[in-house]
Image (spheres, rainbow, N blue to C red):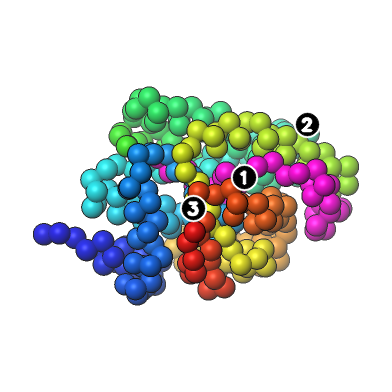
Amino acid sequence: MKIDINIFIQQQLLITTNKKFSIAYISRSITPIIDKIINTNDNKFLISGSQGVGKSTLAIIIKLVIEKIYKKKVMILSIDDYYLSKNKRNEISKKIHPLLKTRGVPGTHDINKLRRHINNFNKQKFPISTPKFDKLKDDCSKTLNKVTSAQILILEGWCCGTSAVEDKYLYKNINKLELNLDKNFVWRKYYNSILKNQYQSVFKMFDITIYLKPPSFAYVLKWRVLQEKNNAIKTNQKKLMNKKELSFFIQHYEKITKWMIKTMPAKADLLINLDRNQKIKKIT
């Protein structure tokens, strides 16, 4: 029996998000993304976008559909799972700058391990044991995810595919964190240098970049708060960040996120514009 792709996506979205999306919306906004991936000879895809934008959900739906309907194995890597351990971030925060204690910016990931796992995929060298990061503990999990085979690789992450920030914008203070805690630009110069070199070498390993663009940065906090509430329900945890804590937290991401909103539409192979309700408005 042939599976209706749109109905299948609708079912999986309901399970994943607890929301029922119309078939018309799915056929217009989600199926074309999967068609783009399937109807190409490329096999490595970046999915990027700000915090809370829906990258992980999109990656999961793509994997479920391709594996069920097209019978190809999909390996998903999240750049968040490659964060350095709490101890390692403490070390570099003492050597370079205190703000590097907080996970997020380039320089707080184990980029060499990520590159090694991508190379293993390229060589079809399986199994690949990928890391998991526990955001509640803000530390690496001891549990690993073992991938035994895959024909398609997706790397999803908030800064994936972006270029380094130009100096004029890098040195402009856009929030209190930069103004008060990075007056000499040491933190910014460090993460931008890492982004310009090590991270670009990883991004260039991918064939197609998919960028999820929010209407503006103002929606990042709103969507991140919703994400935190959903995480609390899923994990049954009460020790999560409140709105004030999240507001401070995303200031660490603000510069690169705003830079991406400005530059990624021209850079991405597939641009997904989101509306105020976090739904796909247009694909170009």
The amino acid on which the numbered mark 3 sits, given as a three-letter code, is: Leu
The x, y position of residue 55, in whole percent, is 49, 55
Give the residues drawn in magenta, as a range: 153-180
Q: Which mark is residue 95?
A: 2
Q: How far is the residue under mark 1 from the one under mark 3?
A: 14 Å
Q: Name the residue under label 1.
A: 162
The x, y position of residue 153, in whole percent, is 40, 40
Q: How far is the residue under mark 2 from the one under mark 1?
A: 26 Å
Taking the magenta stretch, the answer to whether it contains residue 32 is no
Q: For the residues labelled 2 and 1, say whether their Cβ atoms are less than 8 Å apart.
A: no
At horizontal 29% and vertical 50% (from top left) the residue drawn is 66
The amino acid on which the numbered mark 1 sits, given as a three-letter code, is: Thr
Quadrant of res 111: top right
Relative vertical location of residue 168 with respect to residue 227 in this rendering, above or below: above
Q: What element carries label 1?
A: loop
At horizontal 87% and vertical 53% (from top left) the residue drawn is 180
Q: Is mark 3 on a helix, strand or loop?
A: strand
Taking the magenta stretch, the answer to whether it contains residue 170 is yes
The x, y position of residue 164, in whole percent, is 69, 41
Q: How crowded is mark 2: few (under 14 residues within 10 Å), some or many (20 or more)?
A: few
Q: Mark 3 points at which residue?
A: 270
